[in-house]
Amino acid sequence: MAETRPSIADKRRTFRQLHASGCFLIPNPWDVGSARYLQSLGFNALATTSSGFAWSCGRPDGAVPVESVLTHLQAMVAATDVPINADFESGFAPDAAGVAANVRLAVETGVAGLSIEDATGDPSQPLHTIDVAVERIRAARRAIDAAGGDTLLVGRAECFLVGRPDLDETIARLRAYSNAGADCLYAPGIVGREQIAAVVAAVAPKPVNLLVGSASELTMQEIEALGVRRVSVGGALARTAWAGFIDAAMLLAERGRFDGFAKAASGQALNTLFGGDP
């Protein structure tokens, strides 16, 4: 008898349980194949990466239309048995009503969670004002609640990523997003034990996601001791894969050499991995 795959409700229930205690790693695949491989390693949940997916489409981060992102989310959910958290950027809309409409569509793809960030994409005004950002989080919350409320909402303060590394502003924004209905809080770009501990304390008891997107001296055990509930890696796995591809391709183009294939994965192993049903 074929094993029954978990339902969307099952995945969402599991995802919320993961946020209840302890600390878990939620790596970021950029396509179905990388998601299936990460699932095979035993990770309990996965998160999409806007940058990794954009690069796979030949676009810069932030330049993929919402229709393509929704199709991607649906494919990632269908291909895996673990909860998927969606990097839903800033909601793909200029106003709160548009955010709500798009969040409703994202929930319909079956994701177990989704994040809304406060970046505008405009270098001259990189962040929404806190009042506007809060209203956008509230709109996302209303859309999720109208769909049943079991999809987890992550509120992101992008201060450190847009050139405003102000911890006080970051904490003020995260607290406001928590009060507006975010279930989990996220400030990508914070580094060091003091910053991490300050963010965790500021929004407690709600869980915090930490981005570790480059080589770090911190271990998962040390991160858990700081009170972080989950750790994601953003586009780091995609960038690592691109680095191997670029190195091998450059050797071909510039020197006519095939040395870059020395560490290539086994085709037989990949066929075996992807040979069965997800």
Image (cartoon, grey):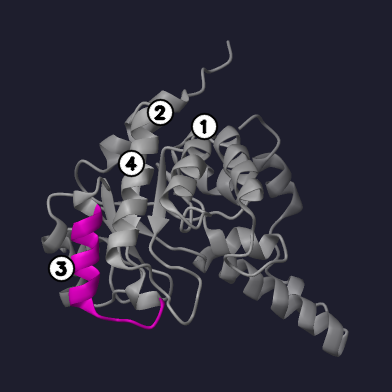
Look at mark 1 in the image and give the residue it sits on. 108
Do callouts 1 and 4 mark residues in contact (Cβ within 8 Å)?
A: no
Give the camera-side residue of 238 and 61: 61
In the image, what residue occupies the spot 21% across and 41% down?
20
Residue 197's disc is: 3
**In front: label 3 or label 4:** 4
Specify the segment rendered in magenta.
162-177
Q: Hey, what amino acid is under mark 1?
A: Glu
Q: Percent position (x, y) of residue 225?
A: 15, 61
Inspect this view and state whether residue 197 appears: yes
* x 31%, y 46%: residue: 138
**Marks 1 and 2, the one that precedes in the sequence:** 1
Instruction: Give the distance between the C-alpha atoms of the residues marked 1 and 4, in whole angstroms.
Output: 15 Å
Q: Is residue 275 left or right of residue 125?
A: right
First in sequence, mark 1 or 4: give its number. Answer: 1
Label 3 to label 4, Cα distance in Å? 26 Å
Q: Amino acid at mark 4?
A: Arg
The tag on residue 147 is 2
Q: Which residue is mark 4?
A: 141
SS under mark 1: helix
Which of pointers 3 and 1 lies earlier in the amino acid sequence?
1
Front position in the image: 245 or 150: 150
**Label 4 packing within 10 angstroms: few (<14), some (14-19), many (20+):** many
